[in-house]
Image (cartoon, rainbow, N blue to C red):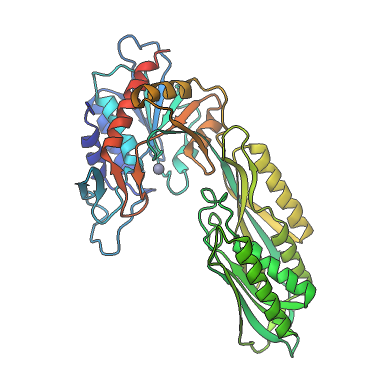
């Protein structure tokens, strides 16, 4: 199989430091690559780069195709590595894989860039006019694509090369937003003769709120609220603090509260009841879940949240949408909408709740936002929304997808996988800026990306490169 200069371009890319936000040097390399070959290239203030190459003989009038990858990488070092960020990565080949000694390899998305450069460099291929787009800062905030001019690209067919499963074509992604609810804290003195305890929920599996939201895993913050609500209504309690989770986009795997109660035995009994109920409910997903209670040192001048504040917070935590809300009717097993209650924090001034809404249908995302606004209003809380990113909705009519599948079947002799994912991709931004863009996303097998163990399967990259060149040859009209 002729891979052109695929792997020499890949190795060249690994010599250039390009952690997210530091893409100037890689952009200069791309511009000089274009200049040496007499190709038109442009860049912008955030170092996005587009290189244009005319269609080959017989393809001059074909509609242009955009090949897109991102030029930044997640640079991660192992604890014992002495690698200096500025020096080339130490690429190692072993058992059919490439990896980097002591650091991440940056095949996410360096291999997508290398495929694109190998195609631009190769005079023996047949292809329509190409626009090779390299975006920046994909890994931390998608700033490159966010800044991209809606007038840069002429092509309306895009192949995104930032996926990591060979033979799987992504045809849609979720949009999302981060709601943060804030309820003012109000305090009063704790009843003087009540005993103090710490209630702890541990042993949950947690996980990514996009990838693992449909696994039925327990949300520690919601579960903590259930216990507190039952304790409050049955026994009467006061709460001096409560917290859970550490990231908006991670399913919280722990939660805890410090509370005071008059009848300690009744609280112990209620804790045991819930411990049993949780183990029963979550025996398939979180078999190590454990709710426990321990005596806690009562502070001098102990203060607790007023009954009204506690009621408002528990009302929110029990009613905010959590986990899967809707499933797709187009693609099997695809979560369409979800919400994660990710972080609960309580400080002197306020109690904050951070969520993560996702949906591949914009109107459903808006519906969940409105639901939260209404709930916040009822709970005397303020609500703000940040980190909004657009969805890429599944498109029934996609000639590019049909061609990609046809070429796949010819090469591999079997049907490919067609998926949509419940997480954000740059493609959502492209769809927003270029609503008539026909897109697919794919790439070769990568393992353990964003870790020092990251590796690229060499044969897989060769096959995907072949698929890509054959697909381009098919895109004559
Ligand atoms: Zn990537």
User: In which quadrant of this rendering is ligand 1 seen?
Assistant: top left
Tell me which corner region of the image, top left, top right, bottom left or bottom right, holds residue 81. bottom left
Residue 471 versus residue 176 in the image, above or below: above
Quarter holding the C terminus is top left
Q: Is residue 352 visible?
A: no
Residue 92: x, y in percent? Answer: 20, 48
Tell me which corner region of the image, top left, top right, bottom left or bottom right, holds residue 160. top left
Residue 403: x, y in percent? Answer: 44, 20
| Left or right: 20, with 101 as reference point | right
Q: Residue at 34%, 43% (x, y): give it.
A: 446
| Left or right: 274, with 332 as reference point | right
- As rendered, which of 152 and 307 lies closer to the eye? 307
| Left or right: 153, with 469 as reference point | right
Residue 313: x, y in percent? Answer: 72, 65
- As rendered, which of 423 and 70 lies closer to the eye? 423
Residue 197 versus residue 457 in the image, above or below: below
Tell me which corner region of the image, top left, top right, bottom left or bottom right, holds residue 333. top right
Quarter holding the N terminus is top left
Residue 303 versus residue 387 in the image, above or below: below
């Amino acid at each position: 199989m002729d891979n052109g200069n695929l792997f020499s371009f890949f190795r060249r890319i690994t010599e250039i430091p390009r952690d997210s936000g530091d893409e100037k040097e890689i952009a200069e390399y791309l511009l000089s690559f274009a200049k040496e070959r007499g190709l038109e290239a442009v860049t912008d203030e955030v170092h996005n780069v587009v290189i244009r190459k005319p269609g080959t003989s017989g393809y001059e009038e074909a509609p242009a195709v955009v090949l897109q990858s991102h030029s930044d990488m997640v640079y991660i070092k192992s604890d014992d590595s002495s690698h200096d960020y500025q020096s080339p990565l130490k690429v190692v080949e072993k058992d059919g894989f490439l990896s980097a000694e002591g650091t991440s390899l940056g095949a996410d998305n360096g291999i997508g860039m290398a495929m694109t450069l190998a195609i631009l460099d190769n005079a023996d291929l047949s292809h329509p006019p190409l626009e090779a787009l390299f975006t920046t800062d994909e890994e931390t905030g998608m700033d490159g694509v966010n800044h991209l001019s809606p007038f840069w690209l002429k092509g309306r067919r895009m192949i995104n090369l930032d996926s990591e499963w060979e033979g799987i074509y992504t045809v849609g992604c979720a949009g999302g937003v981060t709601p943060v609810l804030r309820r003012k804290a109000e305090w009063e003195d704790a009843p003087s003769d009540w005993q103090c305890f710490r209630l702890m929920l541990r042993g949950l599996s947690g996980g990514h709120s996009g990838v693992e939201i449909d696994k039925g895993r327990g949300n520690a913050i919601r579960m903590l609220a259930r216990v507190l609500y039952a304790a409050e209504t049955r026994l009467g309690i006061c709460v001096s603090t409560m917290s859970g989770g550490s990231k908006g986009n991670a399913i919280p795997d722990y939660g805890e509260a410090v509370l005071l109660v008059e009848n300690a035995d009744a609280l112990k009994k209620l804790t045991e009841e819930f411990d049993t109920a949780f183990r029963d409910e979550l025996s398939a997903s979180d078999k190590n879940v454990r709710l426990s209670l321990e005596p806690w040192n009562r502070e001098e001048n102990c203060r607790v949240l007023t009954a009204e504040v506690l009621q408002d917070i528990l009302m929110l935590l029990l009613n905010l949408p959590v986990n899967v809300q809707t499933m797709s009717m187009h693609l099997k097993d695809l979560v369409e909408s979800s919400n994660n209650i990710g972080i609960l924090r309580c400080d002197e001034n306020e109690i904050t709740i951070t969520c993560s809404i996702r949906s591949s249908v914009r109107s459903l995302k808006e519906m969940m936002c409105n639901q939260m606004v209404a709930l916040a209003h009822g709970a005397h809380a303020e609500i703000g929304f940040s980190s909004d990113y657009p969805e890429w909705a599944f498109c029934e009519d996609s000639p590019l997808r049909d061609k990609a599948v046809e070429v796949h079947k010819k090469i591999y002799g079997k049907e490919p996988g067609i998926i949509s994912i419940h997480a954000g991709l740059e493609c959502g931004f492209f769809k927003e800026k270029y609503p008539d863009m026909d897109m697919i996303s794919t790439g070769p097998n990568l393992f353990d990306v964003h870790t020092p163990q990251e590796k690229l399967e060499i044969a897989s990259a060769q096959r995907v490169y072949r698929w890509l060149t054959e697909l381009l040859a098919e895109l004559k009209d």
